[in-house]
Image (spheres, helix red, strand yellow):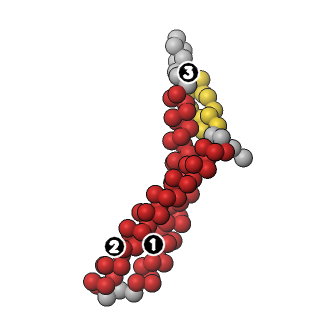
Amino acid sequence: MAFSKTFPRTIQGSNYPLWEEIYLTEQEERAAEESCRQENFQLMDEALQEAKMLAIKHGINEDQIRTQLAIALFEKRASHVVFWKESIAKEKFDGKK
């Protein structure tokens, strides 16, 4: 099922906007997902390195920190993918004006 997002288009002389639904192509969706995945991977790598340094400094179990960070990444990934897709849909909508 294709990703879609609805945006309001202002109509001159009307107080009410015309809502327009923008669909992403399969390629646009995959590109957004891949960009999000790469950025999340880089952020997670940095977070793991920092967490490891803190764990060593404070004598905390590194495995526990890795597990907690992995869970946090898993929970955030879906919302980030939606954000990236919405951004592409907004660019398409703005380009139609």
Q: Earlier in the sequence, mark 2 or mark 3?
A: 3
Q: Closer to the observer: label 2 or label 3? A: 2
Q: Secondary structure at mark 2?
A: helix
Relative vertical location of residue 86 with respect to residue 13 in this rendering, above or below: below
**Looking at the picture, how far across and down is residue 62, in whole percent?**
40, 84
- At label 3, counting other C-alpha atoms closer than 10 Å, the crowd grade (few under 14, some 14-19, many 20 or more) is few
Badge 1: residue crowd in 10 Å (few <14, some 14–19, many ≥20): some
Residue 6 vertical position relative to residue 18 in the rendered view, above or below:
below
Q: The residue under label 2 is which amino acid type?
A: Glu
Q: Nearer the viewer, residue 37 or 77?
A: 37
Marks 1/2: CA–CA distance: 11 Å
Distance between mark 2 and mark 3 Cα atoms:
50 Å
Query: Given the image, on which type of amino acid does mark 3 rest?
Result: Tyr
Q: Which residue is mark 1?
A: 69
Which residue appears farthest toward the left when viewing the image? 57
Q: Which residue is mark 3?
A: 16
Q: Position of residue 72 (x, y in %)?
A: 48, 68
Q: Which residue is mark 2?
A: 50
